[in-house]
Amino acid sequence: MRLNEITYTDAVPVDGYGPGFFRVGGTVHQGPLLMWDRGRADWGGLDDVETLLSMVGLVDVLFIGTGAETAHVPAGLRAQLEEAGLGVEAMNSPSACRTYNVLLSEGRRVAVAALPV
């Protein structure tokens, strides 16, 4: 088995998560969170479209973590984001965080907006 060390350059991955929080760079953040390679912001959840639209031009794919269980992103939200040029992938929040971390380590232009588990 070959193991490769993961490096994130200046980006900070999601370190962990738990009931109601995410840990990023050793700091605990309560509630929903938006992260991308150059920063992070509080996110108001699936009704907070403007925060997600701020990623247009900065990222190619936005992973939406829907909490503990996988759920569909509301059709209107998906349509707004895709019309603005963002690729959208919905999955449960743990999977969204893991996928974000892997693609971030590859230098991809990705963001994750995640609801806590």
Image (tube, rainbow, N blue to C red):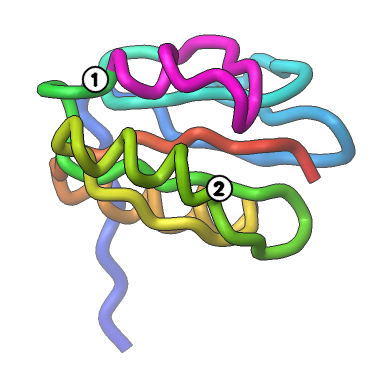
Read off the residue under disc 2.
Answer: 74
Question: Residue at horizontal 65%, vertical 61%?
Answer: 71
Secondary structure state at the residue bearing disc 1: loop
Read off the residue under disc 1.
Answer: 10
Q: Amino acid at mark 1?
A: Asp
Quadrant of image for the N terminus: bottom left
Q: Residue 90, position in %: x, y?
A: 49, 57
Secondary structure state at the residue bearing disc 2: loop
Q: Is residue 19 above or below residue 9?
A: below
| Mark in front: 2 vs 1 | 2
Question: Residue at horizontal 58%, vertical 17%?
Answer: 43
Sequence-wise first label, 2 or 1: 1
Range of magenta residues:
40-54
Q: Residue 117, position in %: x, y?
A: 80, 46
Q: Is residue 45 above or below residue 4?
A: above
Residue 46 falls within the magenta-colored stretch: yes
User: Mark 2 and mark 1: span between their CA atoms?
Assistant: 33 Å
What residue occupies the far front of the structure in this picture?
76
